[in-house]
Amino acid sequence: MSVAREKLKAAKRIVVKVGTSTLAYGASGKLNLYRIEHLIREIADLHNSGKEIIFVSSGAIAAGMEKMGIAKKPETIPENQALAAIGQGVLMHIYEKFFAEYGQTMGQLLLTGEISTNEHARENAQNSLMTLLKMGVIPVINENDAVATEEIRIGDNDNLSAMVASLIDAEILIILSDIEGLYNGNPKIDSAAKLIHEVPKINSEIEKIAGGAGTKLGTGGMFTKIQAAKIATQNGITMLIISGKKIGNLRRALNGEEIGTIFF
Ligand code: GLU
């Protein structure tokens, strides 16, 4: 086991980010309740084991689309804002239910880019997060899409999760993605593409590989994940990209198993 992976075992404060394509079925766009329930149970159990987990979840717009019977993500910002407003509640209702089943309390925070540009906003978010952690509550975070206008918009939760991790001095950021990690090519079109297990330094080669992908539901691709990895590692935080599709991966990664890509 590499030294960087070995260190994961002892980590206490961990940010877990899950993307829309992990939370929803690709074909129908509807929420994958089986996967969501297992993920929440895993987070609840990690919390029971003494770790502090901060959960950053996308999926508001997808949940809003499902609720309203809309199959294709709308083009206009107001429509997406409205869907986020609808879906955020739906999503929290599901999380609240599952967390409560496993004896956990969660608290929702909707943030904007102001946590990195406005000192006052940063301090407020920090205070509220730290207090939730002290209370033994699991913070559940998303961007405040319904009000996040151009100037204060982050736009993707990869960057948001890295900002949050920095804000609260987390040790690890784990990004649950729809692929296994960072490949040296595009595994969707190139069968010879190989998974890169360790990235000790983000150089131009890594940035080139990341390109700019994405799915019809989510907004982030590898590109935003590399941006997040930069923010994280610059702040001394180890970041991992692992597949969110395999039940139990979170625990495996935290046990130091060689899955996904680690940036340190
Ligand atoms: N905040 C968006 C949502 O909840 C997702 C952003 C992202 O996919 O990174 O739908």
Image (cartoon, rainbow, N blue to C red):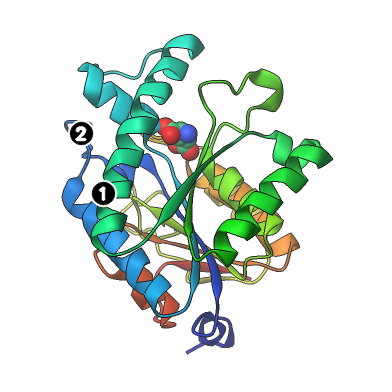
Pointer 2 residue: 30
Look at the image and tell me in which quarter the C terminus lies: bottom right
Q: Residue 35 vs residue 187: left or right?
A: left
Q: Position of residue 131 (x, y in %)?
A: 62, 58
Residue at (17% x, 52% y) in the render: 34
Q: Is residue 48 visible?
A: yes
Pointer 1 residue: 97
Give the answer, above or below, for where 177 lies relative to 20. below
Q: Nearer the viewer, residue 192 or 91?
A: 91
Give the quarter of the image for residue 29: top left
Secondary structure at numbered mark 2: loop
Label 2: few (<14), some (14–19) or many (≥20) C-alpha neighbours in 10 Å? some
Secondary structure at numbered mark 1: helix
Which mark is nearer the camera, 1 or 2? Answer: 1
Q: Position of residue 261 (x, y in %)?
A: 48, 66
- Whichever of labels 1 and 2 marks the residue nearer the N terminus, that label is 2
Number of residue marks: 2
Give the answer, above or below, for where 80 lies relative to 198. above
Q: Residue 156 vs residue 218: left or right?
A: right
Q: Amino acid at mark 2?
A: Lys
Give the quarter of the image for residue 244: bottom left
Residue at (63% x, 18% y) in the render: 149
Label 1: few (<14), some (14–19) or many (≥20) C-alpha neighbours in 10 Å? some
Residue at (44% x, 82% y) in the render: 256
Give how far apart the Cα atoms at labels 1 and 2 are: 18 Å
Q: Position of residue 124 (x, y in %)?
A: 72, 44
Residue that lies at the very extreme toward the right in this rendered image: 119
Numbered circle sitting on residue 254: none
Q: Nearer the viewer, residue 90 or 19?
A: 90
Q: Is residue 211 visible?
A: no
Q: Amino acid at mark 1?
A: Lys
Q: Are marks 1 and 2 in contact (CB under 8 Å)?
A: no
